[in-house]
Image: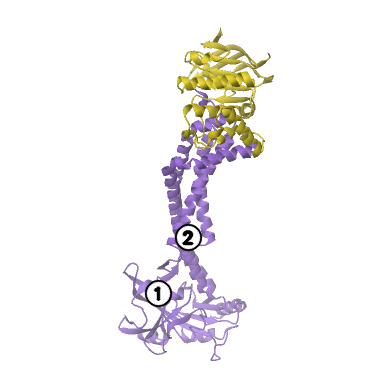
């Protein structure tokens, strides 16, 4: 009880004396806030990117690529292979009674990015009538779907946010051809929102792709049918393709690209944290030396060294918690939901929104508290070793 | 009268670099219950060292230090801290009040080391502040009080846990003559009416006159000046 009381008194005194070291304490809070904001920004970026890629894949849609291709761009699939895929086990029938397969091809075209006013790559995807059926989350929200056989195009809402010149009704030029934007589609939280869609046969003929495609998306009867279908594709000698669930495909891509952002964010956060730690140590040493006479007096009266240690630790933790709070607030107000785009796998832009969640907040706050903890330990030890002699020296 | 404090053959040496400086080499001192002793002496005579030994904030190299029948020279840091909290009230030259706490909170500090309830603590703080005549300033912070008032708060803090022994280090060294006399009068009152045993280190012969006897310390040896 007495230890609790005396420690409580010392903590209260330390915290109440923070205003006496206002500017120094504010600098510490500020530097920790900055660390938290930067780290949180990067983690929110990685988080948003991951969520977008992971949200893109359905568990009951298989994606088939040429064996050895990691991404759609370097894959080739022929009409014959697509017919063979339709004979696989567990393939769902489309409204026309035929296997639900969307044979697709992807080209890279240029667009002007709004944020930088520079050219950036984006995917122009050729899809067939089954394209929307294997993407139930995609909906035309403005205008209409393109008419098969025409030079019409629909744009993803994410792409519209990030790039200029794709508004409904606009006419575009890719290569020698002109295209008309007739619709806008939304597929919230998926990479498809960063794409342009047009009729696959039109793209094949205008871009001289013959009758080849790059990927086939195969609708299965249920996620449970996936292993048997994957095995069929692997074992069927005539196919020479590799199938996996769309969910796995995007999760793999998310991991690769997401890790890049994450591994850039953490080292930067930690380097900044070391800087903030130096500031915190400085502040806390200053706090201990400015209170040296007070600590010595308390020690003379009979207060323990432990209470001086805990008092200093708590002061450091309070400062770092304040810093964390400010950092999270800055990030939540400034970054959360902000849209961004970056190069995804396949060298095309993926638009996504920064997402701040409890998980990454707790990571950033933990880093802040570690700064506070280390910033408090050494000055705290100095405080606890303060001899009671001093105050009596005449 | 019985002895409250007894120092027997106390030795104390400090190391300064490679040199060792002997402060006390067989010091003997007895202070009776209810005594009020002023200790005077030139700088370097060992006053501060004596104060630290009497207050349990430093340890002797050898010899015995007894307090009220309790031998404290063998105590470790923690035991000494506990003994100080129970037995000694300290009064410093520069008051050493906590600037962020008001008068009542400052006075309450030693009670934080006891098991007293919050209500009992408040009652004791009120009594102590009334004894020094500052109950009406209970909510004032140190910077809102004069030097004399701050020293009174410090006295209230020293007596709030009702220790037998008050140790004063130049308690009027920072005060003008009139205020100093007021403070010394209060100490005298605590000695005479409440039976507190007081040891006061001072440079000021005027201050020493308030004590029952004065000891002169020179090069680690006492010469008594009886009043």
Query: Which image quarter holds the N terminus of chain B?
Result: top right
Q: Is residue B132 left or right of residue A281?
A: right
Q: Residue beneath label 1, please? A: A159
Tell which of B214 and A328 is nearer to you. B214
Residue A258 vertical placement versus B20 (above, below) = below
Horizontal and vertical percent position of residue B96: 51, 29
In the picture, the disc for residue A71 is none
Tell which of B128 and A355 is nearer to you. B128
Query: Which image quarter holds the C terminus of chain B?
Result: top right
Mark 1 neighbour density, 10 Å: few (under 14) some (14–19) many (20 or more): many
Horizontal and vertical percent position of residue A1: 66, 39
User: Which residue occupies 56% across, 81% down?
Assistant: A236
Name the secondary structure under disc 2: helix
Residue A300 vertical placement versus B117 (above, below) = above
**Colour in which chain B is drawn:** yellow
Residue A244 vertical placement versus B141 (above, below) = below
Question: Which chain does tag 2 point to?
Answer: A
Horizontal and vertical percent position of residue A307: 58, 37
Picture mark count: 2
Question: Which chain does tag 1 point to?
Answer: A
**Colour in which chain A is drawn:** purple
Question: Is residue A241 among the parts visible in the rendering?
Answer: no
Q: Residue beneath label 2, please? A: A43
């Amino acid at each position: 009880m007495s230890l609790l009381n005396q420690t409580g008194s010392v903590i209260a005194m330390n915290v109440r004396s923070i205003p006496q070291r206002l500017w120094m304490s504010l600098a510490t809070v500020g530097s920790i806030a900055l660390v938290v904001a930067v780290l949180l920004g990067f983690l929110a970026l990685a988080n948003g990117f991951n969520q977008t890629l992971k949200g893109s894949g359905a568990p009951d849609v298989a994606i088939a690529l040429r064996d050895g291709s990691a991404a759609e761009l370097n894959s080739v699939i022929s009409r014959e292979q697509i017919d063979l895929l339709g004979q696989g086990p567990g393939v769902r029938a489309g409204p026309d009674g035929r296997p639900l397969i969307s044979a697709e091809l992807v080209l890279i075209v240029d667009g002007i990015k709004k944020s930088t006013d520079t050219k950036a790559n984006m995917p122009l995807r050729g899809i067939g009538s089954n394209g929307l059926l294997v993407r139930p989350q995609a909906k035309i929200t403005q205008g209409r779907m393109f008419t098969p056989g025409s030079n019409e195009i629909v744009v993803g809402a994410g792409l519209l946010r990030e790039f200029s010149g794709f508004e409904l009704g606009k006419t575009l030029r890719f290569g020698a051809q002109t295209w008309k934007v007739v619709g806008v589609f939304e597929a919230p939280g998926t990479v498809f929102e960063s794409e342009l869609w047009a009729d696959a046969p039109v793209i094949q003929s205008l871009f001289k792709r013959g009758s080849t495609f790059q990927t086939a998306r195969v609708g299965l009867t249920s996620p449970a049918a996936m292993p048997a279908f994957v095995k069929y594709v692997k074992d069927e000698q005539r196919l020479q393709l590799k199938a996996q669930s769309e969910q796995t495909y995007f999760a793999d891509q998310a991991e690769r690209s997401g890790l890049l952002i994450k591994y850039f964010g953490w080292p930067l956060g930690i380097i900044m944290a070391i800087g903030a730690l130096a500031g915190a140590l400085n502040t806390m040493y200053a706090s201990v030396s400015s209170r040296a006479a007070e600590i010595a007096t308390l020690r003379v009266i009979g207060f323990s060294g432990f209470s001086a240690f805990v008092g200093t630790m708590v002061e450091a933790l309070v400062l770092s918690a304040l810093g964390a709070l400010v950092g999270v607030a800055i990030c939540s107000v400034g970054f959360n939901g902000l849209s961004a785009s970056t190069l995804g796998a396949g060298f095309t832009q993926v638009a996504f929104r920064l997402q701040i969640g409890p998980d990454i907040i707790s990571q950033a706050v933990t880093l802040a508290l570690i700064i506070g903890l280390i910033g408090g330990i050494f000055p705290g030890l100095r405080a606890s070793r303060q001899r009671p002699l001093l105050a009596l020296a005449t | 009268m019985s002895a409250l404090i007894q120092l027997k053959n106390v030795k104390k040496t400090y190391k300064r670099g490679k040199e060792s400086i002997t402060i006390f080499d067989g010091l003997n001192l007895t202070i009776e219950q209810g005594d009020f002793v002023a200790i005077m002496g030139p700088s370097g005579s060992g006053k501060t060292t004596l104060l630290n030994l009497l207050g349990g904030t430093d340890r002797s190299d050898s010899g015995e230090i007894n307090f009220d029948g309790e031998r404290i020279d063998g105590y470790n840091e923690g035991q000494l801290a506990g003994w100080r909290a129970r037995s000694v009230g300290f009064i410093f030259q520069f008051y050493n009040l906590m600037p962020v706490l008001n008068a009542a909170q400052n006075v309450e500090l030693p009670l934080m080391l006891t098991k007293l309830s919050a209500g009992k603590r408040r009652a004791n703080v009120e009594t102590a502040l009334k004894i020094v005549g500052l109950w009406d300033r209970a909510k004032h912070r140190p910077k809102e009080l004069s030097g004399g008032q701050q020293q009174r708060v410090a006295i209230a803090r020293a007596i709030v846990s009702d220790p037998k022994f008050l140790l004063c280090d130049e308690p009027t060294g920072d005060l003008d003559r009139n205020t100093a006399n007021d403070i010394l009068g209060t100490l005298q009152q605590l000695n005479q009416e409440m039976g507190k045993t007081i040891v006061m280190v001072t440079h000021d012969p005027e201050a020493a006159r308030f004590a029952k006897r004065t000891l002169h310390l020179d090069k680690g040896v006492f010469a008594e000046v009886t009043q």
